[in-house]
Image: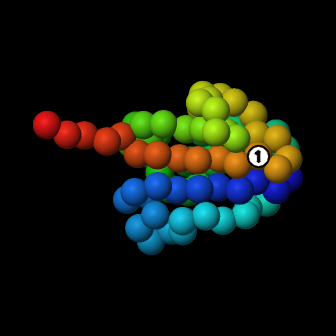
Amino acid sequence: MKVTVKLFAFFREGRFKIENREYPEPMTVSEVVTGLGIDLEEVGVIMINSRHCLFETLLQEGDDLAIFPVIGGG
């Protein structure tokens, strides 16, 4: 299945900004994240088609997956 993956902030470093990727079905959000070498604890927000989702959510053909890091501040 084809999924568009969008990375934000420092997740882009050494990776990509937006990429159309091919994944086998079924595929969870957490499998995509870990497959990109991103620690799940570093993820602050994940969205599919502009809606919040969980790591256990199964991706569907044509989905847009956005991955944002935890943002700290003081």
Count the numbered circles shown: 1
Q: Is the residue 19 above or below the residue 2 in the image? A: below
Which residue appears at 79% of the width and 60% of the height?
22
Q: Is the residue 30 above or below the residue 34 in the image? A: above
Residue 65 x, y percent position in the rendering:
65, 47
Q: Residues within 10 Å of mark 1 (few under 14, many from 20)?
A: some
Tell whether 6 sits left or right of 68. right
Residue 62 x, y percent position in the rendering:
82, 50
Q: Residue furthest left?
A: 74
Q: Residue furthest front?
A: 50
Residue 8 x, y percent position in the rendering:
46, 55
Q: How is the image coloured?
A: rainbow
Which residue appears at 64% of the width and 55% of the height?
5
Q: Is residue 5 visible?
A: yes
Which residue appears at 59% of the width and 56% of the height?
6
Tell whether 31 sits left or right of 1. left
For the C terminus, the quadrant is top left
Which residue appears at 64% of the width and 32% of the height?
51
Residue 25 x, y percent position in the rendering:
84, 44
Tell whether 68 sits left or right of 23. left
Looking at the rendered structure, the kind of residue marked 1 is Asp
Q: Is residue 24 visible?
A: no
Quadrant of residue 36 within the rendered picture: bottom right
Nearer to us in this view, 25 or 6:
6
Q: Secondary structure at mark 1?
A: loop
Q: Which residue is mark 1?
A: 63
Tell whether 72 sits left or right of 53. left
